Amino acid sequence: MKILHIITRLIAGGAQQNTVASCRAQVEAGHEVFLVHGPVYGPEGSLVDEANESGARRSVIHSMKRSVSPLKDYATYRALRKLIRRNQPDVVHTHSSKAGIVGRAAAWKQRVPAVIHTIHGLPFHDGQSGIKRRLFIKAERAAAKRCHKLIGITQAMCDAFQANQIGRDGQFAVVPSGVDVELWENPTRAASGFPDNAKLRDELRTQLGVPLDAVVVGIVARFDPLKGHADLIRIAPQLATKYPKLRLLFVGDGWHRNAVEQAVRDAGMADRVLTTGFVQLRRVALLYRAMDVMVLPSYQEGQSRTLLEALLSGCPIVGYHVGGIPEVCVHNQTGLLVPLGDRDQLRLAIEQTVDQPDQAHERTAQGKQHAREHFSTQAMTDQLERIYHETLEANGASEE
């Protein structure tokens, strides 16, 4: 089978990790896999090396940008049609909003037998202006008519599309975004110079300059206004009053970093916040071991790979009740779930996690099992393979 994946940017994000993992698994299964994306730039990090290692044949379309640009979008459409004509894929699988809209149009025009789109996150949300939100919904409605299957990484993604009259009955499927269970459970096997897990916490805290007995509250997310760093900063002074050695550990980078760092200074928390910048995945897998709790106060989230990573790393989790987070952070079972934007409840959930370590450990153990069973890379790629075959068969297409 020839499979062509299209994604807007190959930055170090959840949708990109999902796509690269799919490419790797499909190459290993014997398929001919292509990966097309726009230019990689900015502080958020890149997955180009991981994509090259996946075995997929990678191409860059320089006109493919995240922002709306009619001239560049049309150039991207033409470039994708040319690439599809040349490679004749059986499946075109698009990811992210811009690549999804333009890529589906190009694949549909070229009569690709199976056109698939994955909804990794919602391109429309309540924080947008009314006009912008309506434009995104209208564009997604048109794009949904130019594909055979819409895949949500959580049921919440499918429900949101259907609530806005995007897509048709029978078009949707849910395939959770898979994570590399082995990487997150056993990071020291892939990293040299680190002690075994029994000593890892103390070693990491020493490297970070954090007291061994500090309370470390972490967040692994790019710096973006919707990720909720500001909410964590707002409650930091109250947490510091209760936990004199409190440290906040911000893992990641992004365009909003300067604003976050200014908010930290304004709150008088500069001596309590550590910012790592972009780090490779294997290093992230280690850093979870330095945390007492991983918090994701995100205002928009498709599923949250980072909460899954934390659970597999043995780190308790707290998250806002939004998007697909409740499918990972099941309240009082795998973590603690907080009403969206309720900073008082966010603080109390963090305190409960820190002050009741036995209960937090029990939730995390359940969460680890939940992640293994439902969110592995193997489970994801097996489901994708089935959807590809079913779609091709339904359209009477033969597979090479």
Image (cartoon, rainbow, N blue to C red):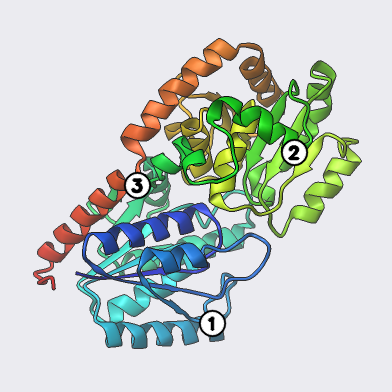
Looking at the rendered image, the disc whose residue lies closer to the viewer, 3 or 2, is 2
Q: Secondary structure at mark 1?
A: loop
What's the amino acid at mark 3? Thr
Task: Tell me the tag on residue 62.
Answer: 1
Q: Residue at x 15, y 58 (%)?
A: 390
- SS at circle 2: helix
Q: Which residue is mark 3?
A: 377
Q: In 3D space, how far apart are the residues under numbered discs 2 and 1 (Cα atoms)?
A: 38 Å
Please state if 35 lies on the left or on the right of 304 as rendered.
Answer: left
Amino acid type, mark 2: Leu
User: Can you say whether 139 is above or below 152 in the image?
Assistant: below
Image quadrant containing the C terminus: bottom left
Residue located beneath label 2 in the image: 208
Asked where in the image residue 316 lies, by quadrant, the reply is top right
Q: Residue at x 66, y 26 (%)?
A: 346
Q: Between marks 3 and 2, how big is the CA–CA gap?
A: 31 Å
Q: Around disc 3, counting alpha carbons within 10 Å, would you say few (fewer than 14), some (14 to 19), or many (20 or more)?
A: some
Real-space Cα separation, disc 3 to disc 1, in angstroms: 30 Å
Give the mark nearer the N terminus: 3 vs 1: 1
